[in-house]
Image (cartoon, rainbow, N blue to C red):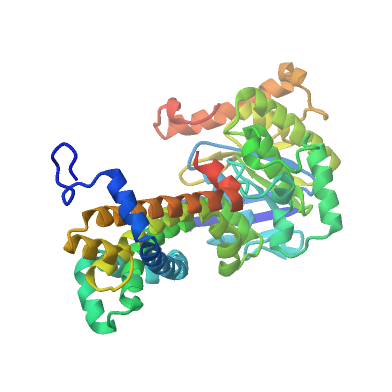
């Protein structure tokens, strides 16, 4: 479980200060899938970095399990928009990278890495090099790398944003499959409202300048999720409410809607 | 012996060049060996200086701000002009030649390696930090391997520059080496041998360059693929 308690984050000094996040509170269940959507500059990525301990909060605190996060912690898995695999290491070694860095590589870790790769549809690709894989496959390797230490929470920063629409849908389904086998908290930042609704238990809608939580929407779609659910009333009403929120907050600030980077 | 009426002391024919080298083969081989030694010594000295320096420039903003201007300054001094001074200080042995070679070769290597060490994606550095990597571990396990393609670009420049540096050193003060062979041969109007020395120098540069290329391909095949 993650408890985010009244967290604020400001950049810069004095008059150049930018408030990236203002008084954000959120409790995330141990096996909950949270999606975060919002316009550019609403502090989505900052929130992920705060949970990972990569940046300290200016105010408030974040509790992971029973530990207050004060510095970078290896108990979270990180997946970024680009796969950022090591070009000199093969697929298996890329997945094992976190274990190597922490000097905790053992046979169990190797077995787990192989199992994750099979689950991600990459069985038999262990010895391939990253540049031999497609973008979607590279990102699946990155997800396996994020999961190899079985972290309490997986933080994903627009992980499918660089992929084409079809690959993206496929990746979403595979992520849910992985999550079913290895349940854990997932915080998934995205620009895509349909993606957020299709994947998440709850969608956190954020507004920009300063970044704060505008609304939290429960997605009451049953699991396993299927493509057919896009026709459901619940799916439609969730996406509509999220869009209304994002566009209303933009309209209020007098910004043209086209500036909101929301699919 | 003239071809098209061009006197041999101006432009010798290829056969004249080959026969001049052939006649003095052992002498030429000795001079080639001397030049090769200077090139290697200067090149190795460049590597062992440039890589730690690049790491320092990358890791410490203070070092970057204070050393970078000095580096640029060191390159603004013409090395050819520096050579006689070095000879004066160090004598006409192999040292001034090695130092000139080093001065010519290390700069592109520092710049390339520093650029490579700074080119690591930010996300990967963050991943390293979340995995409790110290600055040293981050450097050795993430930044340095990422810099390999850049470093090899620098090495290719450095090895070519090393040949130039060695010859410059041999021009100014030396009793051995292909640069010396060339100047002394030309001074005695033995133009074919002078041309022979130049030809061997070019071949030397090409072979050394290709050796670096092949080494990269054998040791870091992924690096070659990354560049294309």
Judge from the rendering whether residue B115 lies leftward or rightward of residue B86; answer left or right: right
Q: Determine the residue located farthest toward the front in the rendered image.
A: B1
Residue B146 visible in the shown view: yes
B178 vs A223, nearest the viewer: B178
When the figure is inspected, residue A115 is found, relative to residue B107, above or below; the finding is above
Q: Quadrant of the N terminus of chain B?
A: top left
On screen, A44 above or below A103? above
Q: Position of residue B214 (x, y in %)?
A: 53, 49
Judge by depth and name the residue closer to the eye, A66 or B162: B162
Image position of A21 (left or right of B202): right
**Quick one: B36 or B42, which is closer to the camera?**
B36
**Residue A205: image location, x then y, percent:** 60, 37
Can residue A7 be seen from the camera position used here?
A: no
> Which residue: 69% across, 61% down?
A101
Instruction: State which quadrant residue B194 falls in.
Output: bottom left
Residue A193, compared with residue B79, is above or below; it is above
In the rendered image, residue A82, in percent from the top left (x then y), is placed at 58, 41
Where residue B155 appears, x then y in whole percent?
44, 57
Total labels drawn: 0
The picture quadrant where one finds residue A172 is top right
Between A196 and B32, which is closer to the camera in this rendering? B32
């Amino acid at each position: 479980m993650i408890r985010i308690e009244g967290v604020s984050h400001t950049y810069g000094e004095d008059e150049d200060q930018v408030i990236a996040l203002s008084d954000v509170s959120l409790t995330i269940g141990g096996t909950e899938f949270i999606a975060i959507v919002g316009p550019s500059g609403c502090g989505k990525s900052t929130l992920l970095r705060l949970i990972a301990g990569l940046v300290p909060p200016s105010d408030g605190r974040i509790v992971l399990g029973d530990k207050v996060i004060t510095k970078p912690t290896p108990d979270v898995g990180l997946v970024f928009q680009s796969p950022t695999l090591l070009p000199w290491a093969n697929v298996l070694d890329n997945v094992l990278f976190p274990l190597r860095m922490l000097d905790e590589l053992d046979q169990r870790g190797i077995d787990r890495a192989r199992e994750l790769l099979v689950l991600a549809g990459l069985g038999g690709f262990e010895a391939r090099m990253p540049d031999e894989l497609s973008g979607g496959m590279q990102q699946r390797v990155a997800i396996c790398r994020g999961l190899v230490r079985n972290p309490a929470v997986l933080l994903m920063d627009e992980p499918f944003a660089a992929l084409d629409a079809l690959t993206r849908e496929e990746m979403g389904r595979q992520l849910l499959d992985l999550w079913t086998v290895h349940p854990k908290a997932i915080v998934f930042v995205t620009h895509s409202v349909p993606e957020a609704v299709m994947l998440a238990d709850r969608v956190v809608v954020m507004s920009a300048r300063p970044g704060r939580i505008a609304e939290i929407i429960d997605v009451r779609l049953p699991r396993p999720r299927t493509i057919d659910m896009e026709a459901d009333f619940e799916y439609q009403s969730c996406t509509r409410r999220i869009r209304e929120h994002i566009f209303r907050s933009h309209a209020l600030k007098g910004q043209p809607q086209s500036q909101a980077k929301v699919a | 012996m003239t071809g098209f009426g061009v006197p041999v002391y101006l432009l010798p024919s290829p056969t004249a060049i080959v026969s001049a080298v052939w006649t003095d083969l052992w002498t030429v081989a000795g001079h080639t060996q001397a030049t090769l030694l200077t090139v290697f010594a200067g090149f190795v000295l460049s590597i062992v200086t440039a890589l730690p320096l690049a790491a320092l420039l990358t890791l410490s903003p203070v070092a970057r701000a204070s050393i970078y201007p000095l580096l640029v300054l060191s390159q603004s001094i013409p090395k050819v002009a520096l050579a006689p001074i070095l000879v004066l200080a160090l004598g006409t042995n192999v040292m001034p030649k090695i130092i000139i070679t080093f001065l010519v070769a290390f700069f592109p290597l520092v710049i390339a390696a520093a650029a490579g060490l700074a080119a690591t994606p930010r996300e990967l550095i963050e991943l390293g930090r979340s995995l409790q990597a110290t600055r040293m571990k981050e450097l050795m396990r993430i930044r340095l391997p990422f810099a390999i393609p850049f470093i090899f670009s620098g090495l290719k420049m450095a090895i070519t520059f090393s040949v130039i540096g060695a010859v410059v050193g041999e021009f100014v003060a030396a009793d051995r080496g292909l640069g010396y062979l060339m100047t002394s041969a030309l001074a005695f109007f033995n133009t074919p041998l002078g041309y022979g020395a130049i030809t061997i120098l070019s071949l030397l540069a090409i072979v050394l360059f290709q050796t670096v290329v092949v080494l990269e391909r054998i040791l870091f095949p992924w690096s070659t693929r990354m560049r294309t």
